[in-house]
């Protein structure tokens, strides 16, 4: 986490820094969280579509599953990289959304995308949510 403290201008690293500081219960976690909140506020004011993944990640960190899912869905319309898949899957699982789990599983199957641990979690969730 201290390796990242000088790289807060990079959004993805800032989210990782906030996450690690919170998990380690470091006293300076609040300082970095405030910076992340400022960044998210700026993105929202500009309706910055380029940062939906980061916004969704932050919403997950802030325990806002519904908001994270909505942002991950918007992001999925524009970007489909591995990190986008993981954030969308995390939001879908946290929200227990069968619809979104199904979207991800269908996409992975159609494209041949492989991420075994996430696919396994999504498959198990699809079975659970369908009951």
Image (cartoon, rainbow, N blue to C red):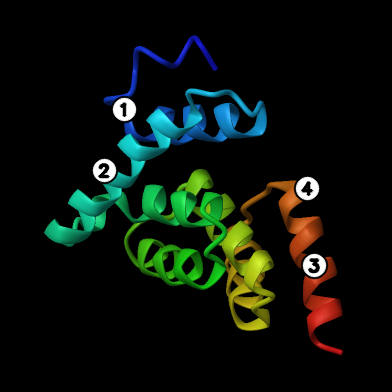
* Callout 2 crowding tier (Cα within 10 Å): few <14, some 14–19, many ≥20: some
Q: Are marks 1 and 4 in contact (CB under 8 Å)?
A: no
Indicate left or right for 7 with 29 as reference: left
Q: Which picture quadrant has residue 105?
A: bottom right
Residue sitting nearer the eye, 27 or 53: 27
Question: Does dot 4 land on a helix, a strand or a loop?
Answer: helix
Q: Which quadrant is the N terminus positioned in?
A: top right
Q: Which quadrant is the C terminus positioned in?
A: bottom right
Residue of label 1? 10
Q: Residue at x 62, y 57 (%)?
A: 90
Residue of label 2? 39
Residue of label 3? 123
Q: Position of residue 9 (x, y in %)?
A: 27, 25
Say which mark, if any, is on residue 117. 4
Between disc 3 and disc 1, whose residue precedes? 1
Residue depth check, mark 2 versus mark 4: number of the one nearer the observer? 2
Single out the residue that lies furthest toward the left: 46
Residue depth check, mark 1 versus mark 4: number of the one nearer the observer? 1
Q: Residue at x 40, y 65 (%)?
A: 71
Between disc 2 and disc 4, whose residue precedes? 2
Question: Does dot 2 land on a helix, a strand or a loop?
Answer: helix
Q: Position of residue 110 (x, y in %)?
A: 60, 67
* Callout 3 crowding tier (Cα within 10 Å): few <14, some 14–19, many ≥20: some
Q: Position of residue 65 (x, y in %)?
A: 56, 67
Question: Does dot 3 land on a helix, a strand or a loop?
Answer: helix
Q: CA distance from mark 3 to mark 1?
A: 33 Å
Residue sitting nearer the eye, 88 or 63: 63
Q: Residue at x 61, y 83 (%)?
A: 99
Q: Are marks 2 and 4 in contact (CB under 8 Å)?
A: no
């Amino acid at each position: 986490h201290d390796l990242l403290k000088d790289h807060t201008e990079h959004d993805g690293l800032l989210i990782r820094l906030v996450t690690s500081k919170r998990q380690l219960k470091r006293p300076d976690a609040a300082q970095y969280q405030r910076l992340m909140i400022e960044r998210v506020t700026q993105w929202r004011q500009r309706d910055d579509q380029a940062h939906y993944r980061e916004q969704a990640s932050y919403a997950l960190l802030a325990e806002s599953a519904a908001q994270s899912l909505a942002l991950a869905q918007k992001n999925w319309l524009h970007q489909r990289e591995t990190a986008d898949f993981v954030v969308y899957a995390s939001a879908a699982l946290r929200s227990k959304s069968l619809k979104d789990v199904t979207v991800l599983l269908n996409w992975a199957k159609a494209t041949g995308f492989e991420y075994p641990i996430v696919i396994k979690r999504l498959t198990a969730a699809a079975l659970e949510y369908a009951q």
